[in-house]
């Protein structure tokens, strides 16, 4: 469907980033800098009134304006265009989408005859590497422009549905964790949103609807359908042979992507949901080397994601690997690995890195499934913080992830009750234990466990609980939101039938723990490696996962070029 949006929806205000960091976002290049860029691009001409880019169309690359003027505008929920900036000679137009040729999030209209230097996505990536100081300035501008679009929601899809609808939260969370702008409209409070539902004859069972920038309307889509509608992911060439396929885009997978890409390997990185993994959902990581004041998981992982694109890594998110076929080494076998994806696409690669991480366990508690997605959560991002604002909430878990979530949510919730099976000092870093003790609205119940959840519909109302080994407490905890961080289990179910050795808990065994002739981080099957939380014996920390990702590239090189390993 290509119906136009209703013309009277209110405009979304522009981001304050465009004002506070305008000089860095919209810097102008001098003649010497433009001359340095000429070898990477080709000159092109556009008449007055022509579009250099349109929302939803595949991006051609980065345009450096040599003469004339180009107005950049973003579309807001009503289909209106709101001007952002006008680029003249020395300005350049683009944001992070230009690194990979993904659809444009803005319109670019020639206000006069324009001559520009066009750097294709491939040439842009080459320039960012070859021209370090100039590339740094341009890369910073591209990132800031994406941040501004995220803050305003401009150029992204419009999600229409009740704010507490589980599928609204699912789609909003998916886009947010993939760093994509969006606008959300609630028909319960927005008359124009109600008009749209009437216009498209949407039933309550079909909510939410999503209006994509290309005009398509989706009714309660899957993440994969939404991603393809807005151009987040494209079809994979099944005839292409990659040097390495990396499954999982958390800290380990992104680190492997960055280092492999920077060393010239042809890399495909897959993830079934979003980049960043569990680390990407951390509100603040304070013990990561080099960030003394801490950094949010989304910011840290977003930088790694941009780095991977800079080095030419092909990122397919969301694409889920469901089957791995290893070489049989028979006479008709080409010696390559074959991945089958959930959408039936197939990927061929000389080497494979398993970086699928671990997932938080689902406790065996009565009533849990009823509230998942609406009142029960397995991560604490700004989206969940918004749902918890001014409410009584509970958090279950005693590790660092639980501690980081509790401290973050304390700034939003009225009261947090933290249930832990053991004393926090035994399971959590000291700085987090002290931070929790200093929060007046966090109450800690140690040696405690849940018994059951209660509520009406999808709305949680209370948690029944008890002390370990004791009878159930007569007074339940009256809470509206519940966060679960109760330990991890490996994402290795999909490896069944591959012959890859797993330890008793299901984590991948690597290196000399599986065979004396295996390379570091190599599994029991040649050319298949495991890094990060999915690896047996790994330290479950972001820095350790990133270290695995960096280290595995040396082993991949040794596998792909055996003479290198033989010669040291």
Image: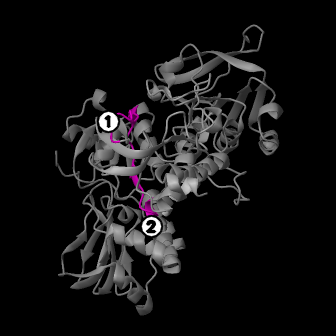
User: Going by the image, does 335 lie left or right of 305?
Assistant: left
For the magenta stretch, what is the residue range? 309-334
Residue 35, position as x, y percentages in the image: 39, 89
Residue 514 figure quarter: top right
> Main structural element of the magenta stretch: helix, strand or loop?
loop
Say which residue label 2 marks: 145
Q: How far is the residue under mark 2 from the one under mark 1?
A: 53 Å
Secondary structure, mark 1, is: loop
As drawn, 145 above or below 434: below
Q: Which mark is residue 192?
A: none
Crowd rating for badge 2 (residues with CA inside 10 Å; few <14, some 14–19, many 20+):
many
Nearer-the-camera pick, 41 or 16: 41
Residue 117 figure quarter: bottom left
Residue 153 figure quarter: bottom left
| Res 418 visible | yes
Quarter of the picture holding the N terminus: top left
Residue 136, position as x, y percentages in the image: 52, 74
Nearer-the-camera pick, 134 or 456: 134
As drawn, 122 above or below 205: below
| Residue 321 part of the magenta-drawn span | yes
Say which residue label 1 marks: 331
Secondary structure, mark 2, is: helix
Nearer-the-camera pick, 381 or 530: 530
User: Going by the image, does 349 lie left or right of 237?
Assistant: right
User: Residue at horizontal 55%, vertical 23%?
Assistant: 460
Residue 381, position as x, y percentages in the image: 56, 43
Nearer-the-camera pick, 450 or 342: 342
| Residue 323 part of the magenta-drawn span | yes
Residue 504, position as x, y percentages in the image: 62, 22
Crowd rating for badge 1 (residues with CA inside 10 Å; few <14, some 14–19, many 20+):
few
User: Residue at horizontal 23%, vertical 53%?
Assistant: 214
Quarter of the picture holding the C terminus: bottom right
């Amino acid at each position: 469907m290509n119906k136009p949006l209703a013309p009277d929806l209110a405009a979304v205000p522009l981001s304050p980033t465009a004002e506070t960091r305008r000089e860095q976002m919209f810097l102008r290049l001098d003649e010497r800098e433009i001359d340095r860029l000429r070898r990477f691009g080709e000159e092109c001409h556009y008449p007055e009134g022509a579009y250099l880019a349109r929302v939803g169309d595949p991006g051609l690359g980065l345009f450096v304006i040599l003469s004339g003027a180009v107005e950049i505008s973003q579309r807001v929920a009503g289909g209106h265009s709101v001007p952002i900036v006008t680029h003249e000679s020395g300005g350049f137009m683009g944001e992070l989408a230009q690194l990979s040729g993904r659809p444009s999030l803005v319109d670019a209209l020639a206000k006069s005859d324009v001559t520009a230097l066009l750097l294709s996505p491939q040439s842009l990536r080459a320039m960012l590497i070859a021209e370090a100081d100039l590339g740094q300035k341009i890369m910073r501008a591209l990132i800031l422009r994406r941040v501004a679009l995220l803050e305003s929601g401009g150029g992204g899809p419009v999600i229409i549905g009740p704010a507490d609808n589980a599928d609204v939260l699912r789609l909003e969370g998916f886009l947010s964790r993939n760093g994509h702008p969006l606008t959300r409209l609630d028909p319960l409070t927005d008359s124009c949103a109600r008009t749209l539902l009437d216009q498209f004859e949407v039933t309550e069972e079909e909510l939410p609807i999503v209006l994509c920038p290309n005009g398509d309307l989706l009714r309660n889509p899957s993440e994969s359908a939404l991603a393809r509608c807005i151009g987040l992911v494209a079809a994979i060439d099944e005839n292409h042979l990659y040097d390495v396929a990396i499954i999982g885009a958390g800290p380990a997978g992104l680190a492997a992507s960055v280092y492999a890409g920077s060393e010239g390997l042809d890399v495909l990185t897959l993830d079934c949901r979003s980049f960043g993994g569990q680390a990407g959902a951390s509100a603040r990581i304070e013990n990561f080397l080099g960030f003394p004041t801490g950094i949010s998981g989304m910011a840290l992982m977003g930088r790694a994601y941009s780095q991977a694109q800079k080095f030419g890594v092909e990122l397919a998110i969301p694409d889920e690997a469901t089957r791995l076929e290893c070489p049989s080494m028979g006479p008709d076998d080409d010696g390559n690995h074959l991945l089958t994806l959930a959408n039936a696409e197939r990927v061929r690669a000389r080497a494979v890195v398993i970086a699928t991480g671990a997932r938080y366990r689902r406790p065996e508690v009565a009533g849990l499934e009823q509230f998942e997605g609406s009142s029960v959560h397995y991560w604490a991002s700004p989206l969940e913080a918004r749902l918890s604002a001014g409410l009584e909430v509970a958090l279950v878990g005693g590790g660092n992830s639980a501690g980081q979530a509790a401290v973050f949510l304390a700034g939003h919730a009225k009261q947090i009750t933290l249930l832990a099976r053991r004393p926090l000092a035994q399971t959590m870093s000291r700085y987090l234990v002290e931070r929790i003790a200093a929060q007046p609205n966090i109450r800690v119940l140690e040696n405690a466990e849940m018994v059951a959840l209660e509520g009406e519909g999808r709305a949680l109302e209370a948690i029944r609980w008890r002390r370990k080994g004791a009878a159930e407490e007569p007074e339940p905890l009256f809470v509206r939101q519940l966060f679960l961080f109760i330990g991890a289990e490996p994402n290795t179910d999909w490896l069944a039938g591959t012959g890859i050795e797993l330890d008793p808990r299901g984590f991948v065994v690597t290196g000399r723990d599986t065979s004396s002739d295996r390379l570091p981080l190599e599994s029991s099957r040649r050319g298949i490696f495991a890094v990060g939380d999915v690896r047996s014996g790994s330290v479950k920390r972001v820095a350790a996962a990133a270290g695995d990702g960096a280290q595995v590239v040396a082993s991949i090189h040794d596998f792909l070029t055996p003479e290198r390993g033989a010669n040291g």
